[in-house]
Image (tube, rainbow, N blue to C red):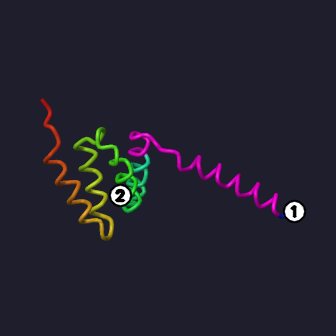
Amino acid sequence: MSCFKSLAVSLAFLLLTTGRLVQAQTYPQLLETAAGHLRQQHYCEATTTFARAFTDSTQVGPFDLYTGASAAAQCAGGQHQALRWLFQLTRQPMCP
């Protein structure tokens, strides 16, 4: 029985700590994370982070899309994603 309790406590701890890591980051936090990946030249990780950030389309700006597209273009197999983000630039409102 103690083995079962130990397993249950370990599982609960894992779920709690994993839940904290999975908590949604804000748009600016995701962009900062992506920028860190870019500084380290980890283009695929940056692309993944930009994709997570861009799920909130209300905050996506043209410079963010361009930077995300640049990262995706440097990631092996990311060229299609880069093009999708570049094409979204044409639908962005222009500055007044």
Residue span colored magenta: 4-32
Q: Position of residue 29 (x, y in %)?
A: 44, 41
Q: In the picture, residue 76 is in which quadrant?
A: bottom left
In the figure, is residue 17 to the left or right of 57? right
Question: Mark 2: which amino acid?
Answer: Thr
Q: Give the mark count.
A: 2
Q: Position of residue 4 (x, y in %)?
A: 81, 62
* Residue at x 32% of width, y 48% of height: 54
| 21 within the magenta span | yes
* Residue at x 24% of width, y 65% of height: 80
Q: Quadrant of the N terminus?
A: bottom right
- Identify the residue under disc 2: 47
**Callout 2: 10 Å neighbours few (<14), some, many (20+)?**
many
- Identify the residue under disc 1: 1
Pair 1/2: label in front: 1
Real-space Cα distance between discs 1 and 2?
A: 47 Å
